[in-house]
């Protein structure tokens, strides 16, 4: 499976943004702290997410990022595709040259799996993830930890 940390982190950061969407933009440093992701790495990811129309940024004090579309209109597949990530279970990247320059015996199996995963990720929106009880519990725990770390 070639879903790397880039895709995982992008989905995690977008879910965090969805959970914390309000009137104010969300600061990347806050997402970095809550999700234990490098701020520099998040900046690279959000540059791609912005270019692909999933987020918008505002500069200055109180600046940060907002979703550009409603969470109901953003799928996990949208996020993964925006950061140039592809879900591919084949060894050959879909080129059908898995065994030297020839197609391998199980190419269709892995290609079908890739298609099923892609289809599944196209059906799940950020809004659906936000509604999951477990996601909300983890978010609440993360927020509490960050509040304890902030100077009073």
Image: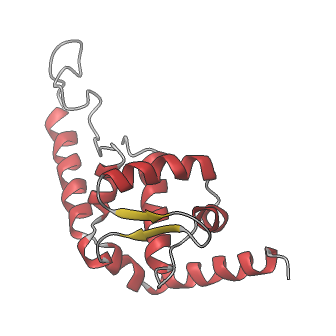
Q: Is residue 40 above or below residue 100?
A: below
**Viewer-closest of 133 and 55:** 55
* Residue lying farthest to the front in this orientation: 60
Q: Is residue 27 above or below residue 109?
A: below
Q: Quadrant of residue 27?
A: bottom right
- Which of the colour schemes (rainbow, by chain, secondary structure, one colour) is used? secondary structure
Q: Position of residue 36 (x, y in %)?
A: 65, 59
Q: Is residue 56 above or below residue 130?
A: above
Look at the image and tell me in which quarter the C terminus lies: bottom right
Q: Position of residue 48 (x, y in %)?
A: 38, 48
Q: Is residue 85 above or below residue 90?
A: below
Q: Position of residue 23 (x, y in %)?
A: 47, 85
Residue displayed at 24% across by 12% down: 100
Look at the image and tell me in which quarter the N terminus lies: top left
Residue displayed at 43% across by 76% down: 18
Q: Position of residue 95 (x, y in %)?
A: 18, 26
Residue displayed at 19% across by 24% down: 104
Residue displayed at 27% across by 58% down: 77
Direction from residue 64 to residue 92 in the image, left or right: left
């Amino acid at each position: 499976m070639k879903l790397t940390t880039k895709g995982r982190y992008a989905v995690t950061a977008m879910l965090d943004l969805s959970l914390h969407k309000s009137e104010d933009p969300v600061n990347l440093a806050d997402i970095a702290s809550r999700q234990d992701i490098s701020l520099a790495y998040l900046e690279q990811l959000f540059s791609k997410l912005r270019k692909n129309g999933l987020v918008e940024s505002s500069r200055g004090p109180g600046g940060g990022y907002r979703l550009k579309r409603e969470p109901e209109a953003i799928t996990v597949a949208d996020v993964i595709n925006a950061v140039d990530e592809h879900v591919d279970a084949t060894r050959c990247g879909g080129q059908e040259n898995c065994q030297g320059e020839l197609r391998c015996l199980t190419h269709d199996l892995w290609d079908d799996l890739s298609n099923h995963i892609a289809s599944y990720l196209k059906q799940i929106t950020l809004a659906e993830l936000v509604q999951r009880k477990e996601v909300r519990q983890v978010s609440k725990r993360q927020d509490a930890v960050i509040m304890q770390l902030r100077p009073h």
